[in-house]
Amino acid sequence: MRPLQISPDTAIKLSKELNVPIEHLMHMPQHILMQKLAQLAQQEAASAEKPKPEDGAEGDK
């Protein structure tokens, strides 16, 4: 299996986001990397969907 064909900058960013050592990331099968990226995207989408309290909403009474 060949190492992933990604730039060093991309590898560093992905290893930090996925909390995986760069050495493991570079030799990770592509389908597993895609699964991890999908999970990360789902987590980010779920955290973005949470409603935030509106600032100053109580002062409009």
Image (cartoon, grey):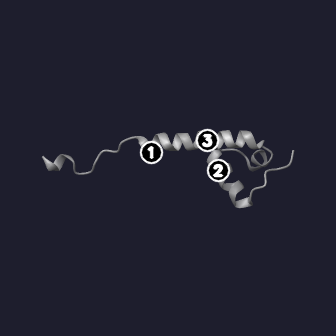
Dividing the image into 4 quarters, which one contains the N terminus?
top right
Q: CA distance from mark 2 to mark 1?
A: 20 Å
Horizontal side, residue 49 vs residue 60: left or right: right
The local crowd at label 1, few if under 14, some if 14 to 19, many if 20 or more residues have their Cα within 10 Å, is: few
Is residue 24 depicted above or below 13 in this figure? above
Amino acid on which the number 3 mark rests in the picture: Ala
Q: Residue at x 77, y 43 (%)?
A: 28
Residue drawn 26% across the image and 51% down it:
55
Question: Which residue position is annotated with label 1?
Answer: 48
Identify which residue is drawn at 74% across, 60% down: 7
What is the spatial separation of the Cα atoms under label 2 and label 3, in whole angstroms?
16 Å
Task: Work out whether 58 lies above or below 10.
Answer: above
Who is closer to the viewer here, 38 or 10?
A: 38
Picture residue at 54% right of the left edge, 40% below the top: 42
Q: What element does badge 1 sit on?
A: helix
**Callout 2: SS:** helix
> Residue 53 at x, y = what percent?
30, 44
Q: Residues within 10 Å of mark 2 (few under 14, many from 20)?
A: few
For the residues marked 3 and 1, what is the alpha-carbon distance in whole angstroms? 15 Å
Disc 2 and disc 1 in contact, CB within 8 angstroms: no
The earlier-in-sequence mark between 3 and 1 is 3
Amino acid type, label 1: Ala
Point out residue 30 in the picture as x, y percentages from the top left corner. Answer: 75, 44
Q: Tell me the amino acid under the disc marked 2.
A: Lys
Residue mark closest to the camera, 2 vs 1:
1
Residue named by callout 3: 38
Which of the pair 4/8 is nearer the observer? 4
* Sequence order check, earlier mark of 2 and 3: 2
Q: Which residue is mark 2?
A: 16
Q: Who comes first in sequence, dot 2 or dot 1?
A: 2
